[in-house]
Image (spheres, grey):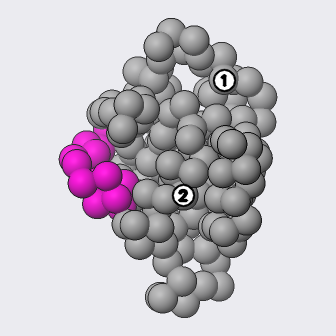
Amino acid sequence: MYEATLEETRELFAPYLEGARSGTVCIVAMRALGDEARRALESSASALGYGHACCTYAILHPEGADGDAALDGQALFLLVEGLDPLVVIAADAVASRALGGAYRQDVPVDAPCRLFGRDAVAFASFESMLGDAQSKQAAWALLKKLPRFGER
């Protein structure tokens, strides 16, 4: 049952999804993240015990899409629920607001929260935090607020 739902979700939202097929860690971002940000998130997820190459990226506004092609709140909710990830990460403030609208709750930036029983964290801009050592440490500190795999 769940495998069909995951496959249907991946098929329905294919233009908005990148990365791992498993959806263990769902990272929501306004635009596609660069290689450095992806490597950092994949490494962090691995360090937290979620495995290698476990991140699925949900892109709210894929490159080349016009305004009508952006995911709205209802579609984002269906996408995340269909993937059924263990944790959710909002990579930027736009993604944080979009998740807040989709789940009808506050998704605070630079703080952990819960989304329908899932642990989540949201960044103002994960990519910009990779620019210096102090910001990288702050990003890692926020990611460490997610539970290690199997802790919940």
Residue reaching furthest to the top: 151
Residue 77: image location, x then y, percent: 43, 57
Disc sitting over residue 79 in the figure: 2
Cα separation, mark 1 vs mark 2, equals 20 Å
- The count of marks equals 2
Nearer to the camera, 64 or 83: 83
Contact check, label 1 and label 2, Cβ < 8 Å: no
Q: Position of residue 130 (x, y in %)?
A: 54, 42
Compared across the picture, whether 40 is left or right of 70 comes to right
* Residue for point 22% across, 47% down: 106
Q: Nearer the viewer, residue 119 or 122?
A: 119
Secondary structure category for the residue under label 2 = helix
The image shows residue 56 at horizontal and vertical percentages of: 66, 47
Residue type highlighted by circle 2: Leu
Q: Per the image, is 43 magenta?
A: no
Tag 1 residue: 50
* Residue beneath the point at 45% across and 23% down: 146
> Residue at position x 59%, y 16% from top?
149
